[in-house]
Image (cartoon, rainbow, N blue to C red):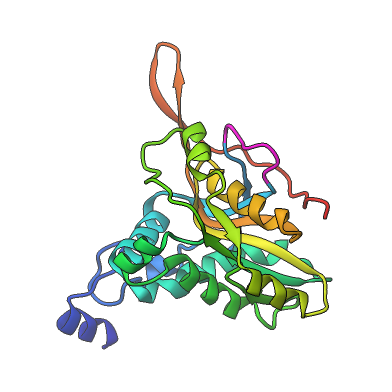
Amino acid sequence: MLDSWLDLVHGAGCVGCAAPGRSLCRTCAARLPGAGRPVRPTPCPDGLAACFAAGDYDDLLRAMVLAHKEHGVFSLADPLGRALAAVALPVLDPGSVNVLVPVPSRPAVVRERGHDPVLRFVRAAARRLQGRGPVVCVTQVLEQRAPVHDQAGLSSGQRAANLVGSMGVRQAAREALARRGAAVSLLVCDDVLTTGATAREAQRALEGSGLPVRAVVTVTATRRRLPVAGRPMSLSYLPALPFSPRAD
């Protein structure tokens, strides 16, 4: 009945299979990854923390990320949060307050879209993680401090240069964490891991302010196109590495 009503009133359909009704049907929801896997961009920015993702930036996850981010399909925030929570859960530090830190979007982009997609699904992930062991909270510690050009089409080196010094730590948020009087462990959260340049810039800003970054967790990770001599461009998965949290 719900699917019929959504189809009739809103013309809604599943982003995965186009079935009429809710934005993510039960069949496609059952396809969501139930755990994360370690990933690593190639080439990898020096000093990047351990990285984990629920799956490739492809098929269902890609459709969900784009529909939520670009088309304001807010009902996808919860399933995206569920995927991120599955990635983050094994990485949480049981002896610390685990702070999920969403990578900030440019203010102009947030105004244009009418929402902050990463913040929205990170909050959904935190709700799922609360009460499952370690203490978890979401804090908007980071902010954009310098203009950043559109990253589409840039190489890994160009992306890194584009982002240098672009993020900073909100002093009020940092002081609020300090007032907790407990050890904190930060997880940088984003929707897509591509070259690692954005995650590394977020990590630089946080650690430069004395805030330890435990890992980077994302919903998806891209596969890079690698040229092979005499052959067409082919796809190569980001190589997986065993989890080894950075020493604080």
Residue 172 position in % (x across, y down): 64, 74
Q: Quadrant of residue 15?
A: bottom left
Residue at the spot 78% in from the left edge and 49% down from the top edge: 244
Q: Is residue 237 placed above or below 136 in the rendered structure?
A: above
**Residue under the point 58% across and 32% down:** 43
Foreground residue among 216 and 203:
203
Q: Main secondary structure of the magenta part?
A: loop
Q: Is residue 103 visible?
A: no
Q: Which region is colored magenta?
A: 42-48
Q: How many numbered markers are drawn?
A: 0
Q: Which residue reaches farthest top?
A: 230
Residue 47: in magenta span: yes
Residue 38 image position (x, y, % from top left): 64, 48
In the rendered image, which quarter contains the N terminus?
Answer: bottom left
Front position in the image: 67 or 54: 67
Placement of the C terminus among the 4 image quadrants: bottom right
Locate residue 130, reporting x and y percent. 66, 81
86 lies above or below 234: below
Q: Is residue 116 visible?
A: yes
- In this rendering, the answer to whether 26 lies above or below 247 is below
Image quadrant where residue 210 sits: bottom right
Judge left or right: residue 124 versus residue 16: right
For the residue pair 68 and 143, the one nearer the viewer reads as 143
Image-quadrant location for residue 65? bottom left
Answer whether residue 106 is magenta in the image: no
Instruction: Identify whether 128 is placed above or below 59.
Output: below
Across and down, in percent, residue 2 comes to 28, 86
What residue appears at the point 53 percent right and 65 percent down from the top-left corner? 83
Q: Residue at x 66, y 50 (%)?
A: 204
